[in-house]
Amino acid sequence: MQNIIVFGASGQLGNCLKKVAGERKIDYIHFLPEEEADILRDDLLDIVFEKYKPTFAINCAAYTAVDKAEDEVDLARAINKTGAANLARHCKAYGATLVQISTDFIFKGDVALPLTEEAIAEPISVYGLTKLEGEQAIAEILDEHYTIRTSWLYSEYGNNFVKTMLRLGADRDELKVIADQVGTPTYAIDLAEAILTIITAGKKAYGIYHYSNEGVTSWYDFAKGIFDISGTDVKVLPIRTSEYPTNAQRPAYSVLDKAKIKATFNIEIPYWRDSLKACIKKLAAAQ
């Protein structure tokens, strides 16, 4: 009997998993409230794993404030590394498989080639480093894990680039957006579909996988796409990273190679603009 538990259920990806699971009529998935499922508290994890006896645990809980992480190293490491290790230990004890969400930020991103799962990880930010440490901690504890690295996540839920651009575009005539950081947006609904496909496939092809939408773009062209699709009249000006200094460094090129996940699980991945259209249509309908 399958039983899935989701940590970080109130966040962007957690909400998308809830929506997709509902559409797929998966009724053996449990979305745990934060107060019941703090990944830093072993006593609560003991209760949760004993109560649900899961076959899969999905970890959507993460510290994702990239710039703040530079000043909150201990908190970022606690959530992204220690929390992930805690879940891995409990999964091992209960014979469960862990699905861990990781990031393109584990890469330096100084070579303009799509990154495979075997590419050398060389994070240039605290956020990227702590997410890599989480990956490594899981791998040391648990064989039965799927670590899915993704990039530029957005959806109708939570705070993300798409919603920020739409909000700013409604108030301003002109926006400056970075044009020399290149990657691929990921619609969190598509990622949720992929996660549930992996879980229900029953393949046991454990390991690291890359998932984003298809295509390549910059933040500047992503912003232009958002305004084009939404019909927002705003002038977008390209700027360089050096003109917009931030606390944390970011990869200049972090396009993920998705050949492995497509071949292993027969997953079809939508083009980024097609998924962006779907998201903006839902946002417009909700207004």
Image (cartoon, rainbow, N blue to C red):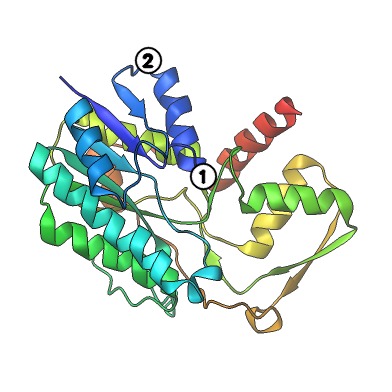
When the figure is inspected, residue 105 is found, relative to residue 39, above or below; the finding is below
Callout 2: helix, strand or loop?
A: loop
When the figure is inspected, residue 77 is found, relative to residue 36, above or below; the finding is below
When the figure is inspected, residue 259 is found, relative to residue 72, above or below; the finding is above
Q: Residues within 10 Å of mark 1 (few under 14, many from 20)?
A: some
For residue 25, the mark is 2
Q: Residues within 10 Å of mark 2 (few under 14, many from 20)?
A: few
Callout 1: helix, strand or loop?
A: loop
Report the residue marked by disc 1: 271
Q: Which residue type carries mark 2? A: Lys
The residue drawn where x is 68% and y is 37% is 280
**Badges 1 and 2: C-beta atoms under 8 Å apart?**
no
Residue 284 horizontal/vertical position (percent): 74, 31
Q: Which residue type carries mark 1? A: Tyr
Residue 149 horizontal/vertical position (percent): 35, 55
Tell me, yes or no, if residue 1 can be seen here. Answer: yes
- Which residue sits furthest front? 43
